[in-house]
Image (tube, grey):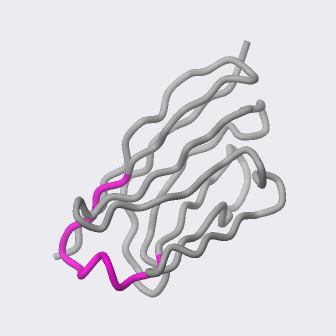
Amino acid sequence: QVYIREFGGGLVEPGGSLRLRCTVSGINFKIYEMGWYRQAPGKQREWVAGITSSGRTNYTDSVKDRFTISRNNAWNTLFLQMNGLSVEDTAVYYCKAASKPFWGQGTTVTVSS
């Protein structure tokens, strides 16, 4: 059984920061490419950032230079450091193993003044 749990969302003012965390069990975490996704109200879920098993990262253009994805394989944990948040970043954030069809419940990020 695969369990995915996201943490760290909340309400933050524009320009603020949050650090999301995702714990994964039931798979050999360290061998999988992992990704963060988000779904804003009324919009489709979109890919935000990815990190390969070797640590190579990639980002969607709208978050480049603001978000940083990282992983700790010893802890089976994925992180997303989000800086310079804007109202457009408001969404439910999910993490996922790239080749697995499993999703967690997500964590809600609300950026508002």
* Residue 38 image-quadrant placement: bottom right
Magenta-colored stretch includes residue 58: no
Q: Residue furthest top?
A: 113
Residue 26: give x, y in percent of width and height. Answer: 18, 75
> Which portion, as a residue range, is magenta?
22-33
Residue 2: give x, y in percent of width and height. Answer: 23, 73
Q: Is residue 29 above or below residue 44?
A: below
* Residue 46 image-quadrant placement: bottom right
Magenta-colored stretch includes residue 26: yes
In the picture, which quadrant includes the N terminus? bottom left
Q: Residue at x 30, y 68 (%)?
A: 73
Residue 51: give x, y in percent of width and height. Answer: 54, 71
How many numbered marks have been drawn onto this rendered protein structure?
Answer: 0
Q: Residue at x 63, y 43 (%)?
A: 91
Left or right placement of residue 48 versus residue 25 in this view: right
Q: Is residue 15 above or below residue 67?
A: above
Left or right placement of residue 95 versus residue 75 in this view: right
* Residue 25 image-quadrant placement: bottom left
Q: Is residue 32 above or below residue 81?
A: below
Left or right placement of residue 4 versus residue 69 in this view: left
Residue 8: give x, y in percent of width and height. Answer: 42, 36
